[in-house]
Image (cartoon, helix red, strand yellow):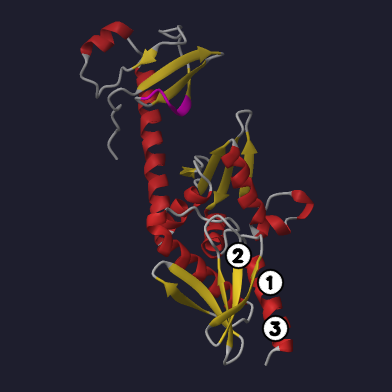
Amino acid sequence: MSDRTLPDGWTIHTRSALGLTALTLYDDGGEFCQTDYHEQTAPPVHPDARTILRALESLPALHIYRALDKVPASLRDAAQELLNSYFERLDQTQADAAALRQAIPDFDALTARLRRSVPDCRTDAYRDGETGRFSLMLAATGAAAGRLLTLLAAWPPVVRAADEELPDGVTADLDTATTLTVTLDARRTRAFLDWYRNDSGLPVDVDSADRSVGEAELAARMVARLREIGVEADTANTGSTCWVAVVPLSERLHLEVFCPEGEGWSWTLHCDGEQIEMGYWSTTSTAEAASHIADLKASLGATVA
């Protein structure tokens, strides 16, 4: 593989101490990328900790060499290794992310929906340089951090975790700026997104232009959950933009279950096509509402044939 070049505007800062030179790579926006360490075999040419090292063979600007005087070849080699290593890791992270998207075809749709459920949530790919393992990082600040924590706490592996410890492969860190960062390894990423696809435990904010798509998706999720617990159900369109989960009770009776925007799950009881009763649960959890529906069906079945 050929050596990488330092992108335009990127810099490598050096700091020497205790026989080591730290080389830190920054992008053109001044954001930190990576740090490597080089063992000194001679006194540093540039003791100033803020010196910007740009003396790579691929750079054509000769005035840079004159400005930095003579940079030892070993230090230039260390800088080149830093560049190569960073971009190799970046390429591997992108490859791992692509593999995950292939394994989860609706990866982009799920993470987009997650960002709507948790406003300002950031989703990033991360690859540990030591282990080579891929992780999904979710980060949110302030009020969004609380919503992300609520979502994490509703995930069954966390609910079942003993001693209030997070399951293996999941870490959560809250910094002093109230930014919550949740990291999921590849296995946990798949499990989390599979669960989130079927039951996020949080309502999804849907724009009015996409309202029919949102209701259809919610109704489909409810039908899938009801079938999992042995309750017959199917989706139905009751109007141009209205979708419900329909639970048959008898030839004359059926329940229609739906989740109005910004509210919990509701139900209406119909007899011969006419609404005769209605009810409401405050929960937005598909699983919890499905359990209530099963109980409601059992109670109605005992009195109505």
**Which secondary structure, mark 3?**
helix
The residue at the point 36 percent across, 43 percent down is 91
Determine if residue 69 is in view. Answer: no
Residue 184: mark in rendering: none
Mark 1: amino acid:
His
Q: What kind of residue is marked 3?
A: Leu
Relative to 103, 166 lies left or right: right
Give residue 52's position: percent from left, percent from top.
Answer: 38, 14
Residue drawn 29% across and 28% down?
A: 7
Q: Which mark's residue is nearer the viewer, 1 or 3?
A: 3
Secondary element type, mark 2:
loop
Q: Pick whichever of labels 2 and 1 is earlier in the sequence.
A: 2
The residue identified by callout 1 is 292
Residue 199 vs 144, above or below: the answer is below
Identify the mark at residue 265; answer none if there is no mark: 2
Q: Residues within 10 Å of mark 1 (few under 14, many from 20)?
A: few
- Quote the CA–CA distance across marks 1 and 3: 12 Å
* Residue at image mark 3: 300
Q: Which of 104 and 153 is in front in this view?
A: 153
Up/down of 40 relative to 138, above or below = above
Q: Where is residue 167 in the image (x, y as percent from the top left)?
A: 67, 53
Secondary structure mainly formed by the magenta segment: strand
The residue located at (76%, 50%) in the rendering is 164
Nearer to me, 98 or 179: 179
Q: Is residue 117 magenta?
A: no
Distance in Å between CA atoms under marks 2 and 3:
18 Å
Q: How crowded is mark 2: few (under 14 residues within 10 Å), some or many (20 or more)?
A: many
Residue nearest the observer in this picture, 127 or 294: 294
